Amino acid sequence: MTVKIKFLGAGDTVTGSRTLVQFRGRQILIDCGLFQGAKPIRDRNWSKFQPDPASIDTVVLTHAHLDHCGFLPRLCKQGFKGKIVTTPGTRDLSDIILRDAGWLEEEAAKYANETGYSNHKPALPLFTVVDAEAALKHFVTEPRHQWIDLGDGIGLRFLRAGHIIGASLVQLAFDGDGQQKTITFTGDLGNGRSHILRGPDQLTETDVLVLESTYGDREQPRDSGLDALAAVVKRTVERRGVLVIPAFAVGRAQEVTYMLRLLEDRGQIPSVPVILDSPMATAAMAVCLKHPEDQVLDSAFHGSMEPLLPRQFEAMASADESMLACMRSGPMIVISASGMLSGGRILHHLKSRLPHEENTVLFTGYQAEGSKGRYLQEQAVKEGNFRIHHEEIPVQAEVVTLHHLSSHVDQKDIISYVERIRRLPKTVFINHGVPEAQVTLAKILHDRFRIDARPVCENAAVELFGSR
């Protein structure tokens, strides 16, 4: 029995997750994500997809973040005809995320054509809302914790990953030539420290593990982050400033919103207006309530959004409401997307708030190398200027990063998770991390568990299990 794996994405970055599995002529794609970050990385989205999308039988989706699902509309447009298999929670979030991504692609192309800044005449979207809607018709949902027969001796099972609603580890089981072998893909693995989400299911055994390494070379703080968040809020309010929080619309926005409510309930921060300026994040809250199987506090919410929300909560729907919010005075808290400043309403809030020293910008999530968020964190604060919409914006506001709120496992979590696997894998492929993180984690796993741990690079291909 021979199973082939080819890493089509997330080999040397934390984006573009795409892994091709081949067995008995079948081709199964685990995740189909967008490349995000610096332009050379984003340009990979325009490269010809190999293999031919029409030759892929099935896509299995770990979760709904764009770096894992965002290329699906283009894959379908290029000829994919099969099923996209995932959990109900991921299907519900994908419906929101893919439609929004298509709209943003159309708006970006429209803006490029109106301003003439693009070298392409005309500038075209990577995909459209119509393409996203067509891709959603391919989705098929399956529950967790039970094996599903994909045919030709291939089984599929989902386990909870604890990263966002619906997020799952994917297990593929292969039966052939008298052998039974299992490959497990972690997708993005949660750390169990969320105030909303349940932690990941513990893997008990697998022959091969494909393991994420976003934080494979570092550790996160172990406290909840509530005190650190309270301190940032209090000093911004004392300055009568505006606290701007760039947040991923799915996962991080809900976590931060609920943490602010907890701090209000405990009397650690004053009640001030809290604006959620992301229609997608508002919609994702409703999805969160719909899936108590992933919640820590399902009994606390009872299907109501009210216990999740700060007392002076406002959700901005229209673009006009968003622009008016940019002109309001503090003290106030604004949560908006995108989390890595790649676009969206957050940029308008930054244009308004960055030039004023009473304000604060608070990063709560990973900023990919080459992203605008990483640039603001590391360079713009030193240089004093940040370019938004082709305009240089002075940086006078305080810029803070909280490392407590990551939805990923860190190095210590990964070691602990692997240690609890009853039958350790013989081989671990380490992806979804920058090269330094991959190499560091591979060495630790090898030295500690004597596992064949291998960092992967883009388009690396391997054969597993051999033939007999």
Image (tube, rainbow, N blue to C red):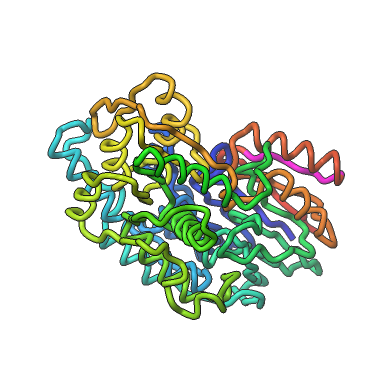
Give the residue at x 61% y 62%. Answer: 162
**Depth order, front residue of 334/433:** 334
**Depth order, front residue of 109/188:** 188
Give the position of the N terminus as an image quadrant: bottom right
Q: What stretch is highlighted in magenta?
A: 450-456
Residue 94 vertical placement versus 150 (above, below):
above
Q: Looking at the rendering, which quadrant does residue 342 occupy? A: top left
Give the position of the C terminus as an image quadrant: bottom right
Residue 328 image point, x, y percent: 23, 47
Q: Is residue 2 visible?
A: yes
Give the residue at x 71% y 57%. Answer: 2
Give the residue at x 36% y 55%. Answer: 274
Residue 40 image point, x, y percent: 41, 32
Residue 290 vertical placement versus 18 (above, below):
below
Residue 409 image point, x, y percent: 65, 50
Residue 39 image point, x, y percent: 38, 33
Q: Looking at the rendering, which quadrant does residue 300 occupy? A: bottom right
Is 90 on the left-hand or right-hand side of 278?
Answer: right
Q: Is residue 83 visible?
A: no
Is 147 on the left-hand or right-hand side of 228?
Answer: right
